[in-house]
Amino acid sequence: MKKLGVFFLVVVSFAVSIYVVSMGGLNAADQSTVVTLFSIPFAMGLVIISFMAIPKQRTFERYQKGLESIIFVLILVLTIIHIGLVFYLMDSGFPIMMLVPIGVGLVFIATANTLPRFQLETPPASSEYTKSTHTVWNKGLRPFSRPLIIGGLAMLVCAFLPQHLILVGFLTVLACTLVTSVFVLVKA
């Protein structure tokens, strides 16, 4: 399902770029504007090609769904940036600053949901150092994820603040989220 969503977002981004260029929605459809308009969809295509080129090995099967989630959110954030770029190039007056908290909030939520999938297994014949390192890693994942989810949701709310408060709210939530995450991680 995520792979289909990724391909859909890339196709939609290319389609939007083609539509805007063909309908003359840009004030100055010069070459640099057209290149700018297609740069993000091409970057999205490169991300998909890179993901498909990752060698599939049995030892990394448990990371497959986590990587799919990360790639999906990355493509989603690039789509949001592309939409903002289209609005900016069309001089629509759309408040582009609201896309920053939306993008970072989605990344935080995806990171928090994906981190617990990367728990390390401790083989019975491993050294004490390896066991203790894996235990600390596994114990710190869930507590570290909670502030990221809460911060990501708060950032999504910050996107809908009045225009002059978006950046202040976003930076405040970002600082609180990072400090809380580090504090929870050190405490665990």
Image (spheres, rainbow, N blue to C red):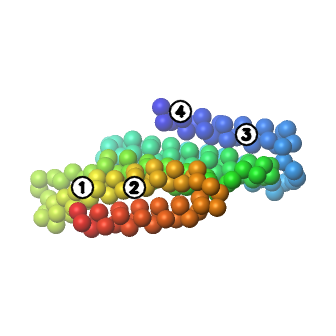
Q: Return the residue at label 1.
A: 138
Q: Earlier in the sequence, mark 2 or mark 4?
A: 4
Residue 41 seen: yes
Q: Give the residue number, with chain letter if any, for mark 2.
A: 148
Quick one: SS at disc 1? helix
Q: Which mark is residue 4?
A: 4
Q: Choose mark 2 or mark 4, whichever is in front.
A: 2
In the image, residue 175 lies at what x, y percent? 45, 66
**Circle number at residue 16:** 3
Contact (Cβ within 8 Å) of mark 3 with mark 1: no
Q: Which comes sooner in the sequence, label 4 or label 3?
A: 4
Q: Nearer the viewer, residue 85 or 124?
A: 85
Type of amino acid at the residue the image marks with label 2: Leu
Callout 2 touching callout 3 (CB < 8 Å): no
- The alpha-carbon separation of the residues under discs 3 and 1 comes to 43 Å
Question: Of label 2 and label 3, which has the lower sequence position?
Answer: 3
Amino acid carrying label 3: it is Val
Mark 4 and mark 1: Cα distance apart in space: 31 Å
> CB under 8 Å between callouts 4 and 3?
no
Q: How far is the residue under mark 4 from the one under mark 3?
A: 18 Å
Helix, strand or loop under label 2: helix
- Work out how far the residue at label 2 is from the one at label 3, CA to CA, in angstroms: 32 Å
Label 2 crowd (10 A; few <14 / some 14-19 / many >=20): many
Question: In this picture, is 129 found above or below 108?
Answer: below
Q: How many marks?
A: 4
Closer to us: 156 or 113: 156
Q: Mark 4 falls on what kind of element? A: helix
> Percent position (x, y) of residue 184?
29, 63
Question: Of the residues tagged 1 and 2, which is closer to the observer?
Answer: 2
Does 8 appear above or below 53? above
